[in-house]
Image (spheres, rainbow, N blue to C red):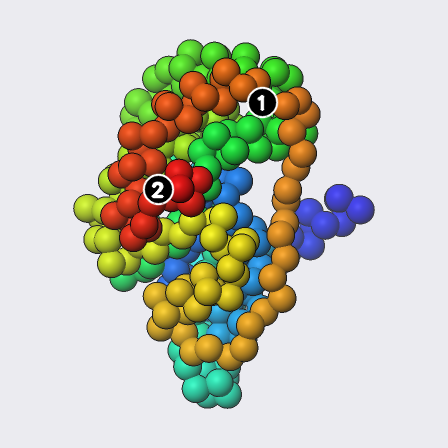
């Protein structure tokens, strides 16, 4: 079955490359963060008839790990302009292509590449309690086989060593990959303000919408309205909101470690206020 699926994907990509010039490029990206509800938001937005997801799969991961494949490969993933024009005529609003690759927020070169290749693109970023995010990411990577350390506290201890020199390598060798930078950055990925500060000079604050994922899951209609307003997309009713990719923790978080991590993230969380327009929900 996997071999058949790979063959179908390969044929679809080949056909897409032949028609790449006739296809849309994204008007917005869900850029992260990882384990912050990006899949749930992606699936809600994909139910809007004018918000067009990639033809093949959710995350193209072009601007982080596949940039060497070139722009035609990337554009091949999106719907044809002719089909988008029909939707525009039918619904009276512009059809917008998008994708969701949560490594874009954290990868040191992704922002620069996006700004250069997609002028005018908008970014949607979700943030979550960084302690919960770190625990969730560890459980996720462990389940996928990308993490070999079963104890979260030990994985946190190893993080500095694992990530040492990773950003320098990725900048020096633009087509390189770094396993730990992508899969073991439990604390680093939760320092959202640092990542947003890197993106702001490239896009401006007005082209970056930062959402509190806890608010999204508690008040999905309100957050959905904000996203449509940010995109300039017409409201055509609410989608079905579901929560995806939740994973239970394999072990409870030790109370002492939890307190230490909350103290660690406090100054980073404080810097999110200007992005969210309010104190993060997990700090209230």
What residue is drawn where x is 80% and y is 46%? 1
Number of marks in picture: 2
Q: Earlier in the sequence, mark 2 or mark 1?
A: 2
- The nearer-to-camera label among 2 and 1 is 1
Q: Name the residue under label 1.
A: 253
Number of the label disc, if any, that sits on residue 110: 2
Q: Compare residues 251 and 82 and report the one nearer the observer.
A: 251
Q: Where is residue 280 in the image (x, y as percent from the top left)?
A: 38, 44
What residue is drawn where x is 45% and y is 82%? 88
In the displayed orientation, state which residue is furthest to the left: 201
Vertical side of 178 occupied by 198: above or below: below
Vertical side of 167 occupied by 108: above or below: below
In the displayed orientation, state which residue is furthest to the front: 284
Q: Compare residues 279 and 170 and report the one nearer the observer.
A: 279
Instruction: Sort mark 1 into few (<14), some (14-19) or many (20+) by Cα contacts within 10 Å.
Output: some
Q: Position of residue 83 (x, y in %)?
A: 52, 78
Residue 205 shown left or right of residue 251 in the figure:
left
Q: Compare residues 48 and 63 and report the one nearer the observer.
A: 48
Give the CA distance from mark 2 to mark 1: 32 Å
Secondary structure under tag 2 reads helix
Q: Position of residue 186 (x, y in %)?
A: 47, 26
Determine if residue 125 is in view.
yes
Q: Where is residue 193 in the image (x, y as percent from the top left)?
A: 30, 38
Residue 16 shown left or right of residue 150 in the figure:
left
Residue 61 shown left or right of residue 195 in the figure:
right
Secondary structure under tag 1 reads loop
Query: Are the residues flagged by discs 2 and 1 in contact, CB closer than 8 Å?
Result: no
């Amino acid at each position: 079955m996997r071999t058949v699926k790979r063959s179908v994907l390969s044929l679809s990509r080949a056909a897409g490359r032949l028609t790449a010039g006739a296809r849309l490029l994204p008007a917005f990206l869900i850029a992260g963060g990882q384990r912050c509800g990006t899949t749930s938001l992606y699936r809600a937005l994909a139910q809007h008839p004018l918000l067009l997801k990639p033809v093949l799969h959710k995350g193209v991961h072009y601007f982080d790990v596949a940039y060497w494949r070139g722009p035609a490969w990337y554009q091949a993933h999106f719907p044809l302009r002719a089909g988008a024009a029909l939707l525009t005529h039918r619904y009276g609003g512009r059809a917008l292509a998008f994708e969701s690759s949560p490594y874009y927020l954290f990868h040191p070169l992704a922002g620069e590449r996006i700004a250069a290749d997609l002028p005018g693109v908008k970014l949607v970023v979700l943030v979550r309690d960084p302690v919960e995010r770190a625990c969730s990411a560890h459980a996720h990577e462990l389940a996928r086989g990308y993490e070999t350390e079963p104890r979260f506290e030990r994985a946190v201890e190893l993080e500095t060593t694992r990530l040492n020199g990773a950003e320098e390598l990725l900048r020096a060798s633009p087509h390189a990959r770094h396993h730990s930078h992508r899969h073991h950055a439990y604390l680093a990925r939760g320092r959202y303000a640092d990542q947003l500060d890197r993106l702001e000079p490239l896009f401006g604050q007005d082209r970056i919408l930062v959402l509190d994922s806890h608010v999204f899951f508690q008040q999905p209609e309100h957050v959905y309205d904000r996203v449509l307003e940010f995109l300039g997309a017409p409201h055509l009713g609410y989608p079905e909101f579901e929560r995806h990719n939740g994973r239970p923790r394999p072990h409870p978080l030790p109370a002492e470690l939890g307190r230490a991590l909350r103290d660690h993230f406090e100054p980073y969380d404080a810097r999110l206020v200007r992005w969210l327009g309010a104190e993060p929900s997990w700090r209230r």
